[in-house]
Image: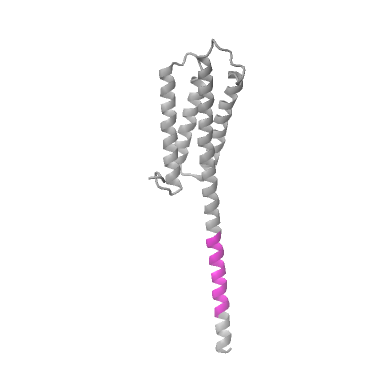
Amino acid sequence: MSLATYAAIAAAAISLVNLIVTTVVTGHRERTKWAREAMTESFYQTLDASYSAREAVAKIRGRQFQTDVADEAGPGREEILPIADTAVDQIRERLTHLRLLASDDVVEAANNLRQKVESLVERAPDPSCGEEEFIRLLDALRTSRSALISAAKSELGLRRTLLK
């Protein structure tokens, strides 16, 4: 065999190795990109559902203090409470996604948020829940939400606050 033949074989082997490495690296990047996008969407939907539950409960509590006025324009307790319950279900569903994609710290923060939302939805609409207890429930929810945001940013490699 001539030197040109050896050079052609070497060039073909190098091209093949280059193709394999490029394919593996590109595949890894695509999987990483997909996982980050899926986690980001799960974080967003979890946080959004927690806000929906809080707003629904606040509407119910607002109506408890308006017993002397019949408000026929807006939905009543029977229409609002399912919104809060749906939000809890959405958080549970997203938590399953996060268990598959995220670290234990993130899953723990998301599960803590779910528990705080459930506590709020279960307790706050009850007329025996006083204003002080309601504020404690809201504070616990707010703290839990902040913890999830911090864990999510850390998981995604983002700075604590992008606006600073």
Image point (55%, 79%), residue name: 11
From the top left corner, tell me how far across and down residue 90 is, in percent. Answer: 57, 33
Relative vertical location of residue 90 with respect to residue 8 in this rendering, above or below: above
Measured as percent of width and height from the top left, residue 100 is found at 53, 43
Residue 106 falls within the magenta-colored stretch: no
Q: Is residue 3 above or below residue 77?
A: below
Compared with 21, 160 (above or below) is above
Which of the two residues, 141 or 94, is positioned nearer the viewer here?
141
Q: Quadrant of the C terminus?
A: top left
Bounds of the magenta segment: 10-26
**What residue is drawn where x is 41% and y is 32%?**
143
Residue 124 placed where, x, y %? 49, 20
Q: Is residue 88 left or right of residue 158?
A: right
Residue 52: name its quadrant: top right
Q: Nearer the viewer, residue 74 or 86?
A: 74
- Within the magenta stretch, is there residue 24? yes
Q: Residue furthest left?
A: 164
Quarter the N terminus occupies: bottom right
Please name the residue shown 54% across and 10% down the image: 68
